[in-house]
Structures are given as structure tokens and as C-alpha cells.
Image (cartoon, rainbow, N blue to C red):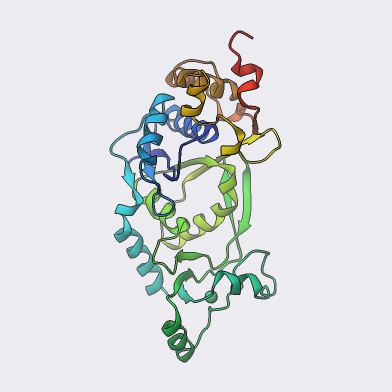
């Protein structure tokens, strides 16, 4: 089995400097520890025509290279189906017919944390199941036997978070992210997951699911996001944030790469040359604030 890190973008649009920074970090983590680096396109949802090609081109432009062929989740339904079937045979799934509205309006179950699925459909009788099945397609949920789970994160230490009866397959038949990511990482030999810290809160669910499936738990490192000057997640409205947009205002891909490296306390230059200086223990722990093209670091020689 390979030992690998990975970057796994959703092809929903162009990558911005925050996404590129996370990809560069994932690459640095993997390569500095002698791992392979894989590229997986998470196209089960929100795929936009042409976006993948632009994303791959932009990753290469900042020095993020990968081993082997790009893997796409839409080609892997059989793997996800097999995992859900294994859980179902073990009595660890159930059908859920709730609408989004019904879940919002349902009173929370006692002792269950805020935002957790209240378990409305957990114990439907055979008769109830038949009535519900006739009215709408079911989502498949995990029959969780715990309310929380603890993961170890390289940057956050020990992190305990909610595990509820989360969705494994949506009622439109699309595999849920939490299931796909667990199956893919294990099947691809990914033993190190480096990604944005907005995903830290769903990591206990994924690690718990991996343990139920008898799959190894990868090493996690959730890295700080890039925020705009108002402290919100970087977005389109923040001006030039993609390589294409930055090139249009005079900043070449190599210069964007250098600005990102400097934000990490690493020397400017080819990504591979930063490997010698890369030390996870010395990474900045707070978010990087992107002040746009006006920020002094973007004014070369200023
Ligand atoms: Zn339900």
C-alpha cells in the first residue's frame, strides 16, 4: 500500500489563493515526509463544466504536482455502494424520509448536541416504512452508536466533535461527502489528510465511520483558512483572488506562489525548494488575512 497525501478540490469554479495555499501545504506535508501526492476531483456535487481543467492547470502553475492519474469520485460509485452495503448488513444504517424543513422544525433529542440529526426515522416500524417509501425516496443515514469521537490533529492536537446519524447517501442517490472521503482515502492509501480547518468539525464523523468500516484513520492536519480583511472566508467579491484574475492585474503565477510561501514563513521560489525549510511545528496557526492586491507584500520592491 502506498503512503500518500492528497489534495481533493470540488470542481465548482476556479481555485482562489486560499485553496492554492492549502494545496501547497498538503504537498509540502506529503513530500517533506516522503509520501506520494495524489489529486482527487470531488465531483459528486457542484461540478461545473471546464472547472477541473483550469484547477489542474493552476495547481501546476504554483508547483503542485501529483503522482499517477487524477481520480474522479463520479467514477467510484461502486466502491461507495459496497461500503454502504457493508454497513447496512451490519445493521448500521437506516432510511430517512425527513425533508430539510422537518429536520429544522424537529425538537432536538435529549442530550443530543445542537445541529445533530434528532433521529426521527431511526426506529420506524415496517408499516411506517412502507407508507413513507411510497411518498418519497429515502436518504441513508448511519445508525451511530456514539455521540462524539476524538481525533488527533497535527496542528489542533486532540479534537473531540459531534457524531450524529449523518447522511451516507442523499435521497437523490448522490453519495454524501463524509462517506466518499473516508472510502477514497483508505482505498487510495492516503494516510495523511491536510485540508482547511473549516473541515475539522466533520472529521470526528469521518474517523468514526472509518473505524466502523475497519479502515485505517489517516493523520490529520487542518490548516488555517485565508480570510478577507473583514474576517470572512475569501470569496469572489474580494476582488482578484484567482490566478487568472491576479494575472490580469499584473501578478504572475510564480509571484502569487511566492506571496503564499512568504505567508507561511517560507522562502520565495520553486515549491520544491521550500521543502528544506518546511517545518509543520513552525507554521502560522492563525488565518492569513488577504488584503487584496493593495497589500504591501504584493507590491514588488515596495
Ligand atoms: Zn428522517
Q: Nearer the viewer, residue 85 or 137?
A: 137
Is 81 above or below relative to 62? Answer: below
Going by the picture, which residue comes out furthest to the front? 248
Which part of the image, by quadrant, shows the C terminus? top right
The residue lying furthest to the top in this view is 301
Q: Quadrant of residue 67?
A: top left
**Is residue 43 depicted above or below 195 in this figure?**
below
Q: Residue furthest bottom?
A: 127
Observer able to see residue 223: no
Residue 264 placement, left or right of 62: right
Q: Give the position of the N terminus as an image quadrant.
A: top left
**Residue 258, percent across and down?**
52, 19
Percent position of residue 53, x then y: 35, 37
Q: In this view of the protein, can residue 54 be seen by the observer?
A: yes
Q: Position of residue 230 (x, y in %)?
A: 71, 37
* Location of residue 27 with respect to 199 vertically, above or below: above
Asked whether 235 or 287 is in front, the reply is 235
Query: Which image quadrant for residue 140?
Result: bottom left
- Residue drawn at x 41%, y 30% is 58
Q: Is residue 75 above or below residue 59?
A: below
Between 262 and 231, which is closer to the camera in this rendering?
231
What residue is drawn where x is 65% and y is 73%?
A: 105
Q: How many marks?
A: 0
x and y, in percent, of residue 197 in the image: 59, 43
Amino acid at each position: 500500500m502506498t503512503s500518500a497525501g492528497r489534495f481533493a478540490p470540488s470542481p465548482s469554479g476556479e481555485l482562489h489563493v486560499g485553496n492554492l495555499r492549502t494545496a501547497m501545504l498538503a504537498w509540502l506535508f506529503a513530500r517533506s515526509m516522503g509520501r506520494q501526492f495524489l489529486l482527487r476531483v470531488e465531483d459528486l456535487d457542484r461540478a461545473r463544466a471546464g472547472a477541473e481543467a483550469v484547477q489542474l492547470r493552476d495547481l501546476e502553475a504554483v508547483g503542485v504536482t501529483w503522482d499517477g492519474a487524477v481520480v474522479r469520485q463520479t467514477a467510484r460509485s461502486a466502491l461507495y455502494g459496497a461500503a454502504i452495503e457493508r454497513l447496512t448488513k451490519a445493521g448500521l444504517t437506516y432510511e430517512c424520509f425527513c425533508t430539510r424543513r422537518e429536520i429544522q422544525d424537529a425538537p432536538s433529542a435529549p442530550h443530543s448536541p445542537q445541529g445533530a440529526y434528532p433521529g426521527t426515522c431511526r426506529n420506524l416500524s415496517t408499516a411506517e416504512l412502507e407508507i413513507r417509501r411510497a411518498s418519497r425516496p429515502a436518504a441513508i443515514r448511519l445508525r451511530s452508536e456514539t455521540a462524539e469521537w476524538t481525533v488527533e490533529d497535527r496542528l489542533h492536537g486532540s479534537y473531540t466533535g459531534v457524531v450524529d446519524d449523518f447522511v451516507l447517501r442523499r435521497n437523490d442517490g448522490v453519495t454524501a461527502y463524509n462517506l466518499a472521503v473516508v472510502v477514497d482515502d483508505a482505498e487510495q492509501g492516503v494516510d495523511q489528510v491536510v485540508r482547511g480547518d473549516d473541515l475539522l468539525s466533520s472529521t470526528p464523523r469521518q474517523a468514526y465511520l472509518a473505524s466502523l468500516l475497519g479502515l485505517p484513520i489517516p493523520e490529520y492536519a487542518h490548516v488555517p483558512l485565508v480570510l478577507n480583511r473583514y474576517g470572512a472566508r475569501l470569496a469572489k467579491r474580494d476582488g482578484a483572488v484567482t490566478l487568472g484574475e491576479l494575472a490580469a492585474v499584473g501578478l504572475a503565477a510564480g509571484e502569487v506562489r511566492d506571496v503564499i510561501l512568504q505567508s507561511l514563513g517560507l522562502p520565495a521560489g520553486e515549491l520544491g525548494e521550500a521543502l528544506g525549510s518546511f517545518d509543520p511545528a513552525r507554521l502560522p496557526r492563525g488565518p492569513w488575512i488577504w488584503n487584496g492586491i493593495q497589500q504591501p507584500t504584493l507590491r514588488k520592491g515596495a
